[in-house]
Amino acid sequence: MRLALIHTVAGLVPRFRELAAELMPEVETFDIVDETLLRDATREGRVSLDTARRLFAHLAAAERHGADAILVTCSSVGGVVDAARSFAGIPLLRVDQAMAEQAVERGARIGVLATLWSTLRPTAALIERTARERERSVEVRDRLCDGAFEALREGDTARHDELVREGLRELIGWADVIVLAQASMARVVDSLSEDERRTPILSSPRLGVERIRDILSSA
């Protein structure tokens, strides 16, 4: 079995390779990286038709190269993945789908934290849609960690992590469960106090790889 992983952040490739090796060592993986997809979505504040066409081209290329399934690891382009699913000849999954489903199952008040506007709204919209499909009543409160993405891009991980911690603390106490819209935020959870970590905090990478593993296993 072969799994294609499509990334918009090159720095996340090692993390997903580690997860794939741990959770499905029998599956061969290959990566397609296009950082312009996220760059353009961030600059334009939306996923444009041109950006969507480029992602469609990567999905088609993954199929041509023999993928048995595709995992897209960027939440910002999740809507395009949803639109492309009916055209794909193989299973196609957005990385945050399993996370959204777990969030809806675990609480009625769901906090969504992101470092980019282009990721914040697609993630919140996915949770709201998932709740409707499951006939669950939820309240979603989203929070942008303004400046955190820029700090990370400039190599200031300490500033990034502090801004994410501030965002988490604003949601802790209100939320039944908190969703991290970007994989790069997950490590900050370990720096929270034991009391703060009593609120479930979900991140997409492991949940997404677990879901695609289950899809491949049942294929």
Image (cartoon, grey):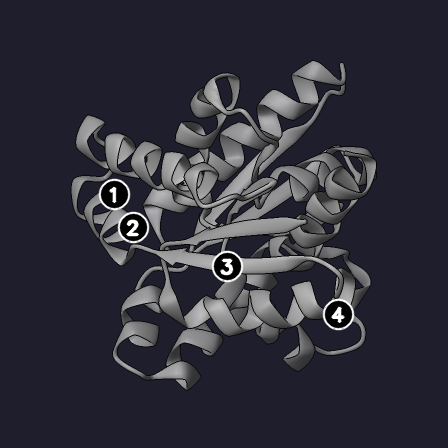
- Whether tag 1 and tag 4 are in contact, CB under 8 A, the answer is no
- Residue 172 in the image: state x and y as whole percent: 67, 57
Residue 205 lies, with reference to residue 129, above or below; the image says below
On-image quarter of the C terminus: top right
User: What label does residue 38 carry, if any?
Assistant: 2
The residue under the point 75% across, 70% down is 22
- Apparent side of residue 82 relative to residue 51 in the rendered image (left or right): right
- Apparent side of residue 135 relative to residue 100 in the rendered image (left or right): right
- Apparent side of residue 137 relative to residue 61 in the rendered image (left or right): right
- Apparent side of residue 49 relative to residue 10 in the rendered image (left or right): left
The residue under the point 33% across, 43% down is 118
Instruction: Give the labeled residue for mark 4.
Output: 22
Mark 2 secondary-structure assignment:
helix
Q: CA distance from mark 2 to mark 4?
A: 27 Å
Instruction: Give the labeled residue for mark 3.
Output: 30
Mark 3 secondary-structure assignment:
strand
Instruction: Give the labeled residue for mark 1.
Output: 41
Mark earlier in primary sequence (2, 4): 4
Res 10 seen here: yes
User: What label does residue 13 carry, if any?
Assistant: none
Mark earlier in primary sequence (3, 4): 4
The residue under the point 41% across, 72% down is 11
- Residue 29 in the image: state x and y as whole percent: 57, 59
Q: Nearer the viewer, mark 1 or mark 4?
A: 4
Q: Quadrant of residue 138?
A: top right
Residue 108 lies, with reference to residue 83, above or below; the image says below
Residue 4 lies, with reference to residue 168, above or below; the image says above
